[in-house]
Image: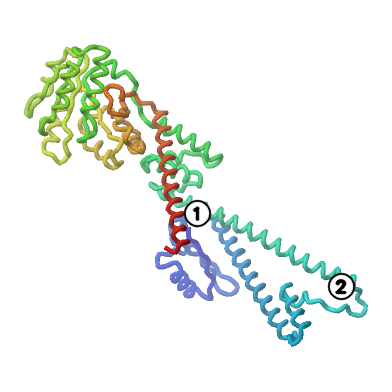
Amino acid sequence: MNVKRFVADNMQQALRMVSAELGADAVIVSSKKLERGIEVVASVDMAGAAAASQPGELERQLRLQRELDAAREATRESEAQRKRDREDLVRRSDLSGAEGIREALNALRSGGPESTPQKPSEGQSAGAQSSAHRTAPAQQTADSGEYQTRLQEMQGELRELKDWLVSHQGSAWDTRRPLTWQQSQLWQRCQDMGLEPAWADRIASASPDEGELENAWQQAMAMIQSDLPVASPGLLERGGKIALVGPTGAGKTTTIGKIAARFVLRHGPESVAFVTLDNYRVAAHDQLRTFARILGVTLKVVKQGDDLAKAIDSVSNKKLVLIDSAGLASQDPHFSVQLSMLKQAGAGIHKLLVLPLTSQARCLQENYEHFKAAGLNGCVFTKMDECFSLGAGMSVAALTRMPVTLVTDGPHIPDDLHYPDAARLVKLAEQMARMARTRWQAAEAMSLANQQQSFQHGV
């Protein structure tokens, strides 16, 4: 927050001062009359209004500003007096001889003519004069120490005030509700993990205002874990009718191959069937046909205009039916046709959205918006071994309450297929954030070192 105090002879002059220093967007927080003129307090940002709503904090800031102004004025007066003393000493000293030069130098080193040695007057003993000379520097040292202590206290209070103002800028989604300094630190850590601002705001706002930051962060991690919906394991054992939807290159067909291979190893090839809707690309279902041949399972291809429900009924004797869809863009005219086929096939189909963790957060959000009309029952995280942040995928699952059903973390079939674990996912997301921060800090330090080296060599 940028709040400043202005003192002028009248309101018009004060407003000109405010406009000249803070600009046309400045807001008058308060004003009051003084003995000689008027005092105006102005601000240039939303935090000024927040501070105005808390008179105690605003009064504390103004008091600190007044004390700082007084300290600066006292420093300027002290420097001016010292300069005048030196000039007066030079004028009064006879610099023609060595004794005069020595006397002037001693006086300048001690800070003024008051410290110039004087002959003891009649009636004043040498011991008394020596005691007075010892007392004066001690008093000056004590005054200087007290001044420095007071200045450090004010600097500390101003630093605390700055932290308060920075953290009370308001949350990213509700600027009227400020965050404490600790909550703002938690919010930033959530951002480093890649969590969506809305989710990070809710987690940081639920954190207590007091206590150790690391303890608060552990509580925030626990909240992230509880917010992340995870489906109960057993899909690979139960079977059923499962359709995978998602964008091109998300890993739908490969994931189907992993699920089928795992199921065939436990229940035999006669228990699995493939059904594909992908007839819109050249050699679209060649990979799935290869999987079917290697595993020895049935493959049904649903052509354009065919009934998906009939194709599923033809393999109703299978314990597991895996449906592969085409990765069409939402603007494609066949996209809505494919979604309609999935919805009309019946409620018995478990539809899972495939979310590649290598995609940007906005891409994953748009994928959900495009495919949610099909009636999604959960999601699958793919390409976890290739990603550098889990926050985007976790945010989509948490904010849409779409349970994470399966996780894939490699190309190997069927080994790289797992049931999700919320605690492991959150911990891994934090580790990725820490590694990324360490890499950037190292890169910044290396860049700074190279700049300094170039400067030293005159490059």
Location of residue 294 by image quarter: top left
Q: Is residue 198 above or below residue 10?
A: above
Percent across and percent down for residue 127 are: 90, 70
Secondary element at tag 2 = helix
**Quadrant for the C terminus in the image:** bottom left
Q: Amino acid type of disc 2?
A: Gln
Query: Residue at 91% across / 74% down in the picture?
Result: 125
Q: Is residue 187 visible?
A: no
The residue under label 2 is 129
Percent across and percent down for residue 451 are: 44, 57
Residue 442 appears left or right of 113: left
Q: Amino acid type of disc 1?
A: Leu
The residue under label 1 is 165
Secondary element at tag 1 = helix
Nearer the observer: mark 2 or 1; the answer is 2
* Residue ranking furthest to the right: 123
Residue 408 appears left or right of 213: left
Query: Residue at 47% across / 54% down in the picture?
Result: 50
Q: For the residues labelled 2 and 1, say whether their Cβ atoms are less than 8 Å apart.
A: no
Percent across and percent down for residue 456 are: 48, 61
